Image (cartoon, coloured by chain):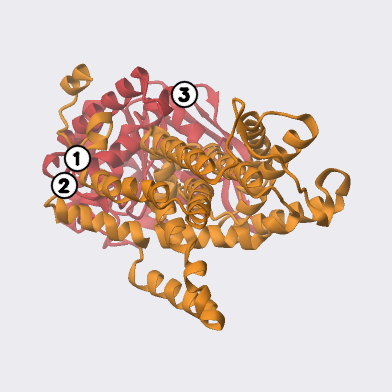
Chain colours: A red, B orange
Amino acid sequence: MTAILEVSDLTMRFGGLTALDSLSFKVNDHETVGLIGPNGAGKTTAFNVISGVLAPTSGTVHYRGSAITGLPTHRIVRHGVVRTFQSTSVFAKASVLDNIVCGGFVNWETGFVSNLFNGAKTRATQAAARDRAMELIRLAGIEELAHSAAGELSYGHQKRLGLLVALAASPSLLLLDEPAAGLNAEESEELAEFIRSVKQQLQIAVLLVEHHIEMITSLCDRLIVLEYGRKIADGPVAEVRQDPRVVDAYLGVDDDDDA
Amino acid sequence: MSELQQTNPVPATAKWKIPQEFLTAKSATYCALFLPLAALPLLIDSSFVYHIAILVCLNAIITSGLGVIVRVDQLSLAHGAFAGIGAYASALAVIKLGVPFLLSLVLAALAAGVAAVLLGRLVLGLKGVYFVLATFAFNELFRMIMLLLPEISGGTNGLSNIPAAEIAGLEISSKPGFYIFIALALAATLLVVWMILRSPIGRAFDAISGNLPLAQASGIPPRRYQILAFTSGSVIAGVGGGIMAAYVGFISPESFTFWFSVNTIIMLIVGGRYSIMGPVLGALLLTPLPEVLRSTGQLQQIIYGVCLIAILRFMPGGVSGLIDRFAELMSGRK
């Protein structure tokens, strides 16, 4: 296993508040890693720094050997690191199909002139993008919704669509920000199953922030636990769950997992 | 086209096939509406009707430019300034350099384009009301600069005696001639806007206005596309300004105050900002309105205001929203 994502000494300060305190960790190829910790531990900040929403105060993020620290989100996507959002995030007025085509923007960017005159290259890449989108729709088993407006889908379907939009950008590392937030037990079970099958079929690595302990234990190969912006544990799921510091800081306090 | 259909399992609702795109109930409705209307001035053949028709086309061109800019969710109050930049560039080129009319329009486009890229890089990072204020300030700045450079701009006196438009030795200063020219210019503008918006560029615009964080997370560089939209729209305003200078024969800084921008916004909102034909409808309704209401004297402004409020209240998608609904009914879809 080789490390693809390398986060070193990441520090993020907001005024007097230190949200991340020299955080370092790695994600290996094809691995599923859970980033957990109590509220305010810095999970979302870490996500925002890795995905380019925030530039860190200090420290570096490398992906497959190239520095992506502080690059804007749209450039980081080109390196293969693609994120989803905590709340539902879709293009509400567009159809499901168009949403996914849009998500694959990096794969269909063609020249200005070709675009303007709908040239052969533009038509070919657009057709390929639609084929790819249909493939993803089939993968998710929502063929019957392909032409529905995204804004009219149920909450669960919108969350799933958010995942498909991210997958359309052909990530090699998928960052999932609380994918199960707002879903009931049954729905999050389904989503976990879907993430597992997607991961298997597309051979990608996943880094997820999540509160649902069941989802984390069923999906992840490894857990990283944050507290006050610092890493307090990093290892296989079973091992981390036994770690007294983790139980003390997080798991023990919040065992009813409906956060 | 045929190999595209083979690789493409999506039925006829797909967007990228040119022939079908024209053959919709919507475009049929618009053709049925506008082609006779466009021919009307030629049949009536009155100088006044030509004048109004020319102004409608002029306003429609300039408003179309603003329609492109609002696609990326930015409302520019500098549209008047860009029309002004185009007008001055074109008029000065014709007066001082003796450049032919059509070439002067190219220069107008260029001048507006360069100014838009520079301003866009500076202010497009601003969000919402801050962007609106920055563009408002730019519009005022443009007016001030024109007033402060009388050697170039003619100062408060403006530039008068702008030579009549001439294309390939053919003078089109006559009203029918100019009307045909500007109607063709409007058709060309609409074609360009349509080409931009139906292309992947338009798709990126929609993504940016639909959900900016998600668009970015999908790899769309928002700034680049916002500058592209702002520049394309401002270039269209610049060309409109150049045509305006040639038609009116006189421009001054007071021709391009921020009220010019506000009027353009009103036409866009009334016509419908989600449709390519919206600007045409807005110009068609609002350009003649003051003339129609002139006989009412004092009441003119009040009636104008009431009409505006009524349209905004009862047609949130503008007039084009209404026509789209009509077209949907005609084609049997709900």
- Residue at the spot of label 3: A113
Residue B147, image x, y percentages: 82, 54
Depth check, mark 2 against mark 3: the one in front is 3
Q: Is residue A173 visible?
A: yes
> Which sits earlier in the primary sequence, circle 1 or circle 3?
3
Do the residues at pointers 2 and 3 share their chain?
yes
- Residue at the spot of label 1: A194
- Residue at the spot of label 2: A190
Residue at 67% in and 44% down: B87
- Whether residues under marks 2 and 1 lie with C-beta atoms below 8 angstroms apart, the answer is yes
Q: Is residue A173 above or below residue A242?
A: above
Residue at 38% in and 47% down: B38
Q: Taking A192 as reference, is A43 left or right?
A: right
Instruction: Determine the secondary structure under disc 2.
Output: helix
Residue at 22% in and 33% down: B20
Do the residues at pointers 2 and 1 share their chain?
yes
The picture quadrant where one finds residue B114 is: top right
Do the residues at pointers 1 and 3 share their chain?
yes
Q: Nearer the viewer, residue B318 or B161?
A: B161
Question: Type of residue at label 2?
Answer: Glu
Q: Circle 2: is it few (<14), some (14-19), or many (20+) Cα within 10 Å? A: some
Residue B27, image x, y percentages: 27, 44
Q: Circle 1: is it few (<14), some (14-19), or many (20+) Cα within 10 Å? A: some
Task: Name the chain under label 3.
Answer: A
For the N terminus of chain A, give its image quadrant: top left
Disc sitting over residue B243 in the figure: none
Question: Type of residue at label 3?
Answer: Val
Q: Taking A89 as reference, is B71 left or right?
A: right
For the residues labelled 1 and 3, the Cα–Cα distance comes to 40 Å
Task: Name the chain under label 2.
Answer: A
Residue at 61% in and 37% down: A59
For the residues labelled 2 and 3, the Cα–Cα distance comes to 44 Å
